Amino acid sequence: MEWCVSMPKIELHAHLNGSIRDSTLLELARGLGEKGVIVFSDVEHVIRKSDRTLHEVFKLFDLIHVITTDHKTVTRITKEVVEDFASENVVYLELRTTPKKNDSIGMSKRSYMEAVLEGLRAITAVDVDFVPRSMDVSSPVTTMNMDTFSGTARKKIYVRLLLSIDRRESTEAALETVKLALEMRDLGVVGIDLSGNPIVGQWDTFFPALEFAKEQGLQITLHCGEVPNKKEIQSMLGFLPHRIGHACCFEEEEWTKLKSSEIPVEICLTSNIRRFRTETISSIDIHHFVDLYNAKHPIVLCTDDSGVFSTTLSQEYRLAASAFGLGKREMFQLAKTAVEFIFADGGVKRNLEDIFFLAEKKLYV
Ligand code: 5GP
């Protein structure tokens, strides 16, 4: 585990409100309980429970959103989530979140995202690079970058943002999110995610907004195949997103299509096992990681919701190592390959490649 922590890592699938520390969530819930907004004793066991079904996960998100959605709290959780990833040597984080509107507290999608940015600016414990430099000026690899993985110098983390469209949203609301992403490109927003309860909403509702986003040059990742829905999975693969998340309920035809299109897959082992335990993935041995890994299909290990599923990215690597017999070299290679699938510009990619190059020497000498 120590080795997995020391290795530099890339996180490409992390939902902000799913990555909140349990301690913070409990503290915020207790505070709202004292104010009479919620009944703390009714929600405490929901927060503390770690083994949840898909349905329970989305019930928990509804609760989390009641607890966290004001500007100050959004700023706080953003800061803490990024600090937590940096502390386990995540050197590049793509953090996704659903911009939320709440007229009763004067929150617009834009002001929600400004609160997220405020959280990034508030971080002092580590150096955070979240505003892209001009395309042709890549920031030099400093000692800070190089020593990031060794724990001997101040850590540095690159953070880029993805705006999520929730499957409960209308076409207009999805378009509003895409337009916001376009406006915020200079502030580190690199793409769009489609997420939310997979049994809610229709692909046709989101397609116009996603197509517009793609035309405008935003990068797209879709939650795909979380439930068996052949028609939707095929439409999503036909759309050719830049990455997909999960791919748990594919059939032979979809695997063939996925592999020929070489769309990278964000794999979230703990999340998949917890939620699909009684359904398609009954145990980790039959997880599709094995088939995709053996086929050399582009994959990246991710946490999904480190708070909700009580995991860390280091733990996901350790789980892969123990379940699938990966050695240190294979794990390092897996982490390093993820650089190819990031949505940030080439300058960041080159810096990350240098970080991995130097880490490789240190970790194996
Ligand atoms: P937020 O976007 O509010 O920062 O993060 C939580 C939200 O992300 C949830 O309400 C849900 O819409 C989405 N989300 C988190 N985990 C998952 C997941 O595993 N599958 C899907 N489809 N959506 C998720």
Image: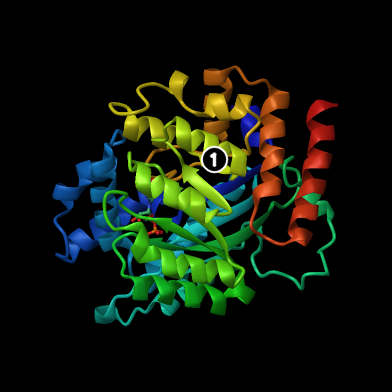
**Dot 1 surroundings within 10 Å: few (below 14), some, or many (20 or more)?**
many
Q: Is residue 257 above or below residue 324?
A: below
Q: Quadrant of the C terminus?
A: top right
Q: In this view, does 88 lie above or below 270?
A: below
**In the rendered image, is residue 301 in sight?**
no
Residue at image position (55%, 42%) is 265
Residue at image position (43%, 33%) is 270
Q: Residue 67 location, x and y as percent?
A: 28, 60
**In the rendered image, is residue 211 in sight?**
yes
Q: Residue 80 location, x and y as percent?
A: 49, 56
Pointer 1: what residue?
258
Residue at image position (47%, 37%) is 254
Front residue of this view, candidates 226 and 133:
226
Decide if ligand 1 comes within 8 Å of the CB at mark 1: no
Per the image, label 1 sits on a secondary structure element best described as: helix
Q: Give amino acid for label 1.
A: Leu
Q: Quadrant of the N terminus?
A: top right
Q: How many labels does the image show?
A: 1
Q: Residue 164 location, x and y as percent?
A: 44, 62
Front residue of this view, candidates 111 and 76:
111
Residue at image position (43%, 78%) is 111
Report whether 231 appears left or right of 345.
Answer: left
Q: Residue 262 location, x and y as percent?
A: 62, 42
**Res 242 → quadrant:** bottom right
Report whether 165 appears left or right of 335.
Answer: left
